[in-house]
Image (spheres, rainbow, N blue to C red):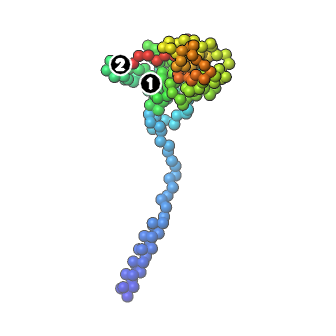
Amino acid sequence: MKLKIVAAIAVFLMTAACGDDKKADPEPTGTTKSAPSGIASGEPVPKKLDIAPGRIGTVKVGMTKAEAAATGYFDTDVKVGAEECERIEPLQWKEFYQDQVDVITNDSGSIVSMGVGREGLKSDTGISVGSTLGDVQTAYGNLSPAVETGYGQTGVYYTTSEGWIGFLFDVSIGQVTKDSEVSFIEVTKDTRPDLMRDGC
């Protein structure tokens, strides 16, 4: 009799164990997207920025340091550079954007220029680094004549009441053609972009 009871208990335990193996883990009630590198937990996952005269995304040239910081795209008072180039920058794009776009500020920390030096970000008319001069001319009807920008490079510009956008080509003014490719894009507000990034 005892053997039958023991056998019955063993069968029950084996059945229960098999049943547990077949049970799926409960589905999570909600999932959380991890933020890209450089975006703190709890901040919204960033949207793709577009480029237009005087602005990149919602960030406008002329914004004060406080206004720019309030957009959520920047860190403030960041130590950058090494040794002889070490300095404190009033504004620096968050890490997620740093390989796509730069920012230049004046002594008070207000934005005076932003530049894009690699493919990825596009203008509100579809132009990006890698687009051709022909593409730029089609996208911007009232484009400036090509001008020498220094270092054997050429620039063209478009301006509106909102500001300037400039496009750099890594060929001299005598060699630029409709097939020449944009190597750098810069936006400013009150003055024509220099289309240069010198120094540390």
Q: How many marks do you count on the picture?
A: 2
State the image coordinates of residue 143 (x, y, percent, origin top left).
Answer: 64, 16
Along the line of sight, the residue nearer the viewer: 140 or 95: 140
12 versus 109 height, above or below: below
Task: Answer left or right for 10 relative to 149.
Answer: left
First in sequence: mark 1 or mark 2? 2
Rendered residue at 45%/70% (across/down): 18
The residue tagged 2 is 85
Q: Residue at x 36, y 22 (%)?
A: 81
Residue found at the very far left of the displayed protein = 83
> Residue 150 or 83: which is nearer the viewer?
150
Q: CA distance from mark 1 to mark 2?
A: 16 Å
Disc 1 packing (10 Å; few <14; some 14–19; many ≥20):
many
Q: Quadrant of the N terminus?
A: bottom left
Question: Between tags 1 and 2, which lies in front?
Answer: 2
**Most foreground residue, 74 or 192:** 192
Residue 54 location, quadrant? top right
Residue 167 is situated, as x and y percent measured from the top left of the image, at 56, 19
Q: Is residue 167 visible?
A: yes
Left or right of 110: which side holds 1? left
Q: Tell me: residue 158, above or below residue 128.
A: above
Quadrant (top left/top right/bottom left/bottom right) for the C terminus: top left
Name the spot of residue 176 as percent of width and height, x first.
58, 17
| Rendering coords of residue 12 (x, y %) | 43, 76
Residue type for callout 1: Gln
Residue holding disc 1: 92
Instruction: Tell me the tag on residue 138.
Output: none
